[in-house]
Image (cartoon, rainbow, N blue to C red):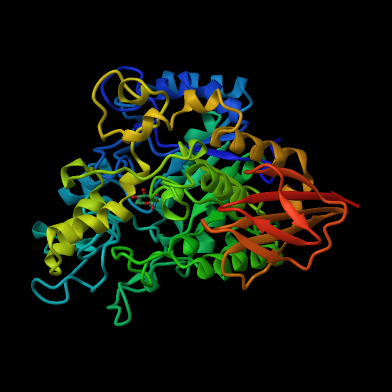
Amino acid sequence: MTDFRKSVVYQIYPKSFRDSDGDGLGDLRGIIEKLDYIRELGVDYIWMTPFFVSPQKDNGYDVEDYYRIDPRYGTMEDFEELSREAGKRGIRLMLDMVFNHTSDRNQWFRKALEGDEKYKQFYIFRKGKAPGVPPTNWQSKFGGSAWEYVEKFDEYYLHLFDVSQPDLNWENPRVRQEIQKVVKFWMGKGVKGFRFDVINLISKSAYEDDDQGDGRRFYTDGPKIHQYLEELNAATFGTDAEIVTVGEMSSTSLENCYQYANEEGTELSMVFSFHHLKVDFMGNEKWVLVPYDFRKLKDIMFQWQTSMAEHHAWNAVFWCNHDQPRVVTRFGDEKRYWKESAKMLGTVIHCLRGTPYIYQGEELGMTNVDFRDISQFRDVESLNYYQILQDKGLTPEQAFQIIRVHSRDNGRTPMQWNDRWEAGFTDGTPWIGVNENYRYINAETEQRDENSVFFHYKKLVELRKKYDVIAYGDVQPVAKEHPQVFAYRRTWKGEELLVVNNFYGKDVVWESGLDLDGYECILENYSGCRREGGVFTLRPYESAVLYKKA
Ligand code: GLC
């Protein structure tokens, strides 16, 4: 059995990973082609974002049919082959299950719209407060009201995301049974991992106006969420101890996460939380331009690390995914210290307590894309907000600058395989533009260079397997107040690890006050970590992992 604490997960966004048939969209056979590459990295799981039949309004997070594979991605035979071939390489598949909502093209919703009462009960329909006024003032996470009017019924349906993504009604036991059936179907295909999309939004408390915000307090970590997760666990994946699960927890709280991901628990193996990635927002407002707050970043990460450990709960640790801009652009320096900062950021995450996730291309140090025109963007959220920002009075240029920085498309440009046609992603025309820096940031170049970001990530994966202190150790923040250094210690049965990172492009002399006798350096991004008498002299974005066995 794979121990998820010793494991590393590699996330694939199939649409942008590798296109095997030249239609410009990545596909399952493309993933099969690249399995040896993934094996070289040493990871244990591949999480694939949804490839089920979908109109692709939200790139597959709008599921039309949970049981079939979208022909654009391939066939069930391709999936089975992928599963077998991955298995031969010791890699398991983790599927992405979207159960807070479906697509409006899902047959359940179509029947609901036809007026079939049984299926209307699968969704959340409500009367407006007055003619033309939605039931509540809740805002969709992709902009605008969270309610859409259906004239035929003179009612609105709830969609916390796009209007094409109606929310499911989990209060209805039939919905919960259908969902169990879906999970069991994929378990029957041998799937050993599941990621549950925005799963902490499924239990709504009351449909009331939110005078303090956008409505999230009425559905985030709602009253029956733990009950629903326990039920799903008991009826499906909980029957197979080999299955690993991760819940995507939107705007969640620590207290809820202790329970979602308790080591003794009956809900999930681990959780994604996002507070540490809101440090370049203003409160919850993402569509603004503000520098990121390093102290806040550190405080939040340490708080989650230590509190989850105290409560015996397990984190997924990560910087990147398909919803986030690229971390080296965000918290590193992609121009002057591209390689150093990409490696440093990888080290910070991979030596923490929790299961690390690598998002495709992160292991190459892929950066944000430099799109010049709004027509190059594809993401529904970005395009909605481009309009909303202008409606609020910003000029098109101001709105564009904000989209450039925060757009999810930064993480969705094609994987950079080599320096040839369209970065080796496709023989055709890619669905979204390739980042121009593929000429020097690409897998082929980096696999030939032992000094590359790729090799650094490969070593990080190896370290977790080799040193129990990384997988199991306690975690203690060091230099908590330091304005430039991100450092922590891990301890486990006589093993000690000290991870020291300079988060800035300036040298820093840091008097750690630590006795470094007996420590050896097991990973660094410069050569020769300077640490005389406990005083570190760190170069720009320098990072070092020191280890000692009693
Ligand atoms: C999650 C997904 C994101 C999607 C949203 C709605 O946050 O990661 O890509 O748009 O849920 O399903």
Inspect this view and state whether residue 311 appears.
no
Residue 29 percent location from the top left of the image: 41, 20
Q: Is residue 406 left or right of residue 273?
A: left
Q: Which quarter of the rendering shows the N terminus?
A: top right
Q: Is residue 165 left or right of residue 304?
A: left
Residue 115 percent location from the top left of the image: 17, 52
Quick one: which residue is furthest to the bottom in this view? 211
Height in image: 469 above or below 205? above
**Which residue sits at x=24%, y=38%?**
55
Q: Is residue 524 left or right of residue 67?
A: right
For the residue pair 419 and 160, the one nearer the viewer reads as 419
Q: Is residue 224 left or right of residue 206?
A: right
Image quadrant where residue 62 sits: top left
Quick one: which residue is furthest to the right in this view? 550
Residue 536 percent location from the top left of the image: 71, 59
**Which residue sits at x=43%, y=39%?**
366
Residue 81 percent location from the top left of the image: 49, 18
Inspect this view and state whether residue 5 appears.
yes
Q: Number of numbered discs present?
A: 0
**Which residue sits at x=66%, y=36%?**
459
For the residue pair 47 and 462, the one nearer the viewer reads as 462
Image quadrant where residue 373 sits: top left
